[in-house]
């Protein structure tokens, strides 16, 4: 049974590795799986911190039984009501009828939305900074609104200096034996952590900054999130990463080229730009065909690099359909501090480049680089030289 005593004598990781679900929230691909981390504190009062996704509860309940046998759980802390963490709440409440469900007043509203017959007498509301004593452990609660739901909160164990941070500092990727950052190769997880951040939390950078500032007063020895690796050695590293991501500070110098093509001409244009970027000194050039690569991967790299060049052919006088999710997400997430170049293709009335130009004009915080380049069919010598100029101007910005 994959459970583990993680810190001190009485804290267990009883999470679930999910390598079966194809898409998180039914739309984000999970090539390396995902975990639903849950923690059991086996103190004088037994306390469960968050549960797991619906469908993972059988193994989860077996783990709980393995630790506590016939004893009962006194408290269920609900840091966040999204069903990847509250999915097994129903079973837990049924199995432990006397359990107190602990959350804030916003949590209660959401519990009642998910469980219409929830008995409010089972709920223990906690306020900002309120403490809950379990015996050896004292827990204290802090809200982190909109990181990434209104009711989101974290639980800090004053005894062991652990921040149970729920989604914050979490990442995609199932755990392959090791749980803590010092037991595995961090770089294997970093991309999936950024992809999680960008696509789940990314819109709420301002709120992430507030949360980091609020949690800054705590002496944090461990961060135990609800997805992915547990942080011990890299507590400072992941807080810095979160802060940089929240403020759109790029990790490395580089450029993402994302294009949508039907007959290959827009693709040819992307290749010309990439070669010129490389020749101009940009080593990190990531090219994505948006018909093949999921938008979440493109978005994650937009968070990593400061340069973005979007290319779209025209489709029914509009943007290429597979480019839509990329552009819509960038708009919705309020991407900032990025340079944007635009290119594309048309045959009669165009539409792809026009839509990208509108996106650039509407999006504050994006600086358009160079002139948009639109080809008619196969790129001519004139178009090739315009594409090279665009690439050179982008490289100059990035390397400045
Ligand atoms: Fe991991 Fe917002 O749920």
Image (tube, rainbow, N blue to C red):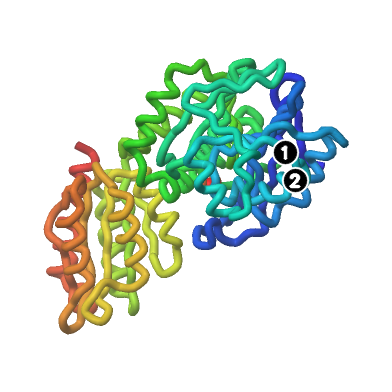
* Residue at the (52%, 22%) spot, across then down: 130
For residue 96, above or below residue 213: below
* Residue at the (29%, 63%) spot, across then down: 270
In the rendered image, residue 81, in percent from the top left (x then y), is placed at 55, 46
Location of residue 298 (image quadrant):
bottom left
Task: Read off the residue under disc 2.
Answer: 60
N-terminal of the pair, mark 2 or mark 1, is 1
In the rendered image, residue 351, in percent from the top left (x then y), is placed at 20, 74
- Tell me how far mark 2 sits from mark 1, CA to CA: 7 Å
- Quarter of the N terminus within the rendering: top right
325 left or right of 177? left
Q: In the rendered image, is residue 275 in sight?
A: no
Q: State if disc 1 and disc 2 touch (CB < 8 Å).
A: yes
Q: Residues within 10 Å of mark 1 (few under 14, many from 20)?
A: many
| Residue sitting farthest toward the bottom | 348
Location of residue 233 (image quadrant):
top right
Q: Which mark is residue 14?
A: 1
Q: Residues within 10 Å of mark 2 (few under 14, many from 20)?
A: many
Q: Which mark is residue 112?
A: none
In the rendered image, residue 191, in percent from the top left (x then y), is placed at 49, 44
Q: Which secondary structure lies at badge 2?
A: helix
Report the front residue among 47 and 126: 126
In the rendered image, residue 92, in percent from the top left (x then y), is placed at 72, 45
281 left or right of 196? left
Report the front residue among 141 and 349: 141
Report the front residue among 116 and 250: 116
Location of residue 134 (image quadrant):
top right
Mark 1 CB in 8 Å range of ligand 1? no
């Amino acid at each position: 049974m994959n459970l583990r005593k993680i810190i001190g004598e009485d804290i267990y990781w009883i999470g679930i590795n999910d390598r079966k679900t194809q898409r998180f929230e039914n739309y984000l691909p999970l090539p390396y799986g995902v975990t639903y981390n849950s923690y059991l504190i086996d103190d004088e009062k037994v306390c469960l911190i968050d549960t797991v996704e619906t469908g993972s509860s059988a193994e989860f309940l077996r783990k709980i039984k393995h630790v506590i046998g016939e004893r009962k759980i006194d408290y269920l802390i609900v840091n966040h009501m999204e069903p990847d963490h509250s999915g097994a709440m129903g079973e837990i409440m049924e199995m432990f009828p006397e359990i107190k469900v602990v959350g804030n007043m916003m949590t209660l509203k959401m519990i009642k939305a998910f469980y219409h017959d929830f008995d409010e007498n089972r709920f223990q509301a906690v306020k900002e900074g309120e403490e809950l004593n379990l015996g050896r452990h004292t827990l204290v609660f802090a809200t982190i609104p909109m990181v990434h739901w209104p009711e989101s909160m974290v639980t800090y164990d004053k005894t062991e200096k652990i921040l149970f941070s729920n989604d914050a500092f979490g990442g995609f990727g199932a755990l392959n034996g090791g749980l803590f950052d010092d037991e595995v190769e961090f770089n294997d997880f970093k991309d999936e952590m950024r992809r999680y951040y960008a696509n789940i939390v990314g819109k709420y950078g301002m709120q992430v900054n507030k949360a980091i500032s609020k949690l800054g007063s705590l002496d944090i020895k461990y961060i135990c999130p609800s997805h992915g690796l547990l942080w011990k050695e890299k507590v400072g590293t992941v807080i810095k990463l979160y802060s940089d991501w929240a403020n759109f500070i790029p990790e490395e110098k580089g450029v993402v080229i994302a294009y949508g093509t039907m007959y290959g001409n827009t693709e040819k244009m992307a290749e010309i730009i990439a070669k010129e970027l490389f020749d101009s000194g940009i080593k990190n050039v990531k090219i994505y065909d948006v018909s093949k690569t999921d938008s979440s991967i493109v978005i994650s790299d937009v968070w990593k690099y400061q340069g973005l060049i979007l290319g779209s052919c025209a489709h029914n006088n509009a943007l290429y359909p597979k480019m839509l999710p990329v552009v819509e997400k960038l708009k919705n997430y309020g991407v900032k501090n990025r340079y944007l170049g635009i290119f594309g293709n048309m045959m009669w009335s165009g539409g792809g480049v026009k839509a990208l130009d509108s996106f650039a004009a509407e999006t504050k915080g994006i600086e358009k680089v160079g002139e948009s380049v639109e080809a008619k069919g196969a790129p001519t010598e004139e178009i090739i030289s315009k594409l090279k100029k665009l690439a050179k101007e982008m490289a100059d910005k990035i390397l400045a």
